[in-house]
Image (spheres, rainbow, N blue to C red):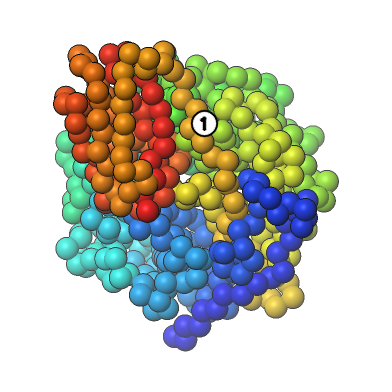
Amino acid sequence: MKNFIYTFLLFPITIGMFPACLVAQDGILDSTFGINGVVVTDINGFDNFVTSSAFQNDGKILVTGIINNGPVKDFIVARYNINGFLDSTFGVNGIVTTDVNGFNDVSTAISTQSNGKILVSGNSGNGINDDFSVVRYNNNGSLDNSFGINGKVITPIGTMHDRSFNILVQQDDKFIVTGNIENGLDNDFALVRYNSNGSVDSLFGLNGVVITDYFGFNDYAKSSTLQNDGKILVVGYNKHSSGFGNEKIMMTRYNTDGTIDSTFGINGIVITELYNSYFYTFPNDIKVQPNGKILVTGYTHTSSTIPQAFLVRYNSNGSQDTPFFLDPIISSSNISPMSGTSIAVQVDGKIIVSSMQLGPPSTFLMNRKDTTGLNIDTTFGNSGIVETIIGTNSNVVNILIQNDGKIILIGNTFNSANNTGHNFALTRYTNPSISVEIETNDSLTDFYSTIYPNPSNGLFEMTIDTPFQEANLTIFDVTGKVIVQQKITQNNTQLNLLSHPKGMYFYQLLIDGKQVTGKLIVQ
């Protein structure tokens, strides 16, 4: 099989960005990434579709998806350097393809473990039905033979089709694959937890598996996330009747052992019908803000309207925090977004939502909202909206935020001019104003603390100059993810971020009920 890979520029246009905007502004294409902020990768001239992306600890970008390798589909992983160009030290010229089981293999999610190993999950056929599958790669893209059988794990669960949609890596490197199973009569949420070596973890659920059926209806999982306390949130939709329509948001929270968390919603489950008149509602992504609020985006539709993106926010107990609302942004072609595809939460709680729209042209489209999700942040892009035209049609699948705050959109593009099929596409944008805003109970007027040197190579010394009873330190990356939680017992403490990539971090120091926040720079 011939492998040819090339990266090229398709004359990207970012709507509303003019030379006058050369001052520091959030949401401007970053010219230091790829070619004028854009990377397009064609592999073999066939249709290749992005399904997921993730950062490595060194800041390199992992993108997984589906490659049409002739009669069947295979897993594909591409790795990009921080500058946007393919990493030639990974696989063959930055690309790895994997035939998992000889039939159609569809990768749907990617993540990494603390040792740098790369996990890709999805579904693999056997000629009759589909099963959950996970592949682990070494840092150079080779299959890790210490994982499963020759680097691959296939897990049959139901009697028919099992389809996974996400993979969640815990702090202990165990990982959870979430999706749904088909048992002939209906579909149900399904979770499987694995030990770090790929064996099923019998301590989770029943022999490593959790299945959730809501009153015998069809339940389809679409996305999932881990809370900072290790609890598992899964969102999808519940269908009450046969045929088309009547789909409602279904969200479930599980304890760390796989049991349903009865403190969430009603017996661990939340069902949300946005409007009685709405014909169907499909969620696509779920994220948790630093304050514990839960965000869900997707699309909703009535029999008389085109699909339209929505964003809804819940309190940490599953009650609805704000009324849902249709995404009010309009693209340059005067087309409203038809679907919210991904959410990223900045460390300051501001919310970035990517959208897919009807075309042509369909474009890379995102907007930024305030911490409530109700108001557009007009300091971002062009009055809160960033739209980038790449090729004839394109759509965003994922949003990533680098440690320096820059925003990367990852998705697919198609250019009818060269007819090379769908290609991987990445764009990067500036985000210089990102900052941390954490509510404080009081100021540290009675305490004096210093952290030095700052910037540093990753080692910091923290000094608290007055006696205290209790102190706790939390360090976040720019996405709001907690990377360090540490109880402080001495006046002088070393903070170690050597294993984390260079960039900006934020700390929250609580001393006897009083709080201070600040930035840490690793360089």
Q: Amino acid at mark 1?
A: Gly
Quarter of the image that includes the N terminus = bottom left
Closer-to-camera residue (137/306) = 137
- Mark 1 neighbour density, 10 Å: few (under 14) some (14–19) many (20 or more): many
163 and 38: which is toward the camera: 38
Residue 170 locus on image (x, y percent): 28, 41
Q: Residue furthest bottom?
A: 2
Taking 222 as reference, is 158 left or right? left
Count of numbered marks: 1
Residue 370 in the image, given as x and y percentages of width and height? 61, 30
- In the image, taking residue 520 as reference, residue 485 lies left or right, namely left
- Residue at coordinates 37% horizontally, 47% vertically from top-left? 455
Residue at the spot 37% in from the left edge and 33% down from the top edge: 507
The answer to whether one can see residue 48 in this image is yes
In the picture of the structure, the residue carrying the numbered disc 1 is: 349
Asked where in the image residue 221 lies, by quadrant, the reply is top left
The percent position of residue 446, horizontal first and vertical second, equals 33, 13
Q: Residue at x 56, y 64 (%)?
A: 33
Residue furthest right in the image: 334
**Viewer-closest of 96 and 212:** 96
Residue 449, compared with residue 345, is above or below; it is above
Helix, strand or loop under label 1: loop
286 and 201: which one is in front? 286
What residue is rendered at 31% in x and 35% in y?
451
Q: Give the answer, above or below, for where 467 lies relative to 422.
A: above
* Any part of residue 130 in sight: no
Instruction: Please indicate whether residue 72 sits to the left or right of residue 413 in the image.
Output: left
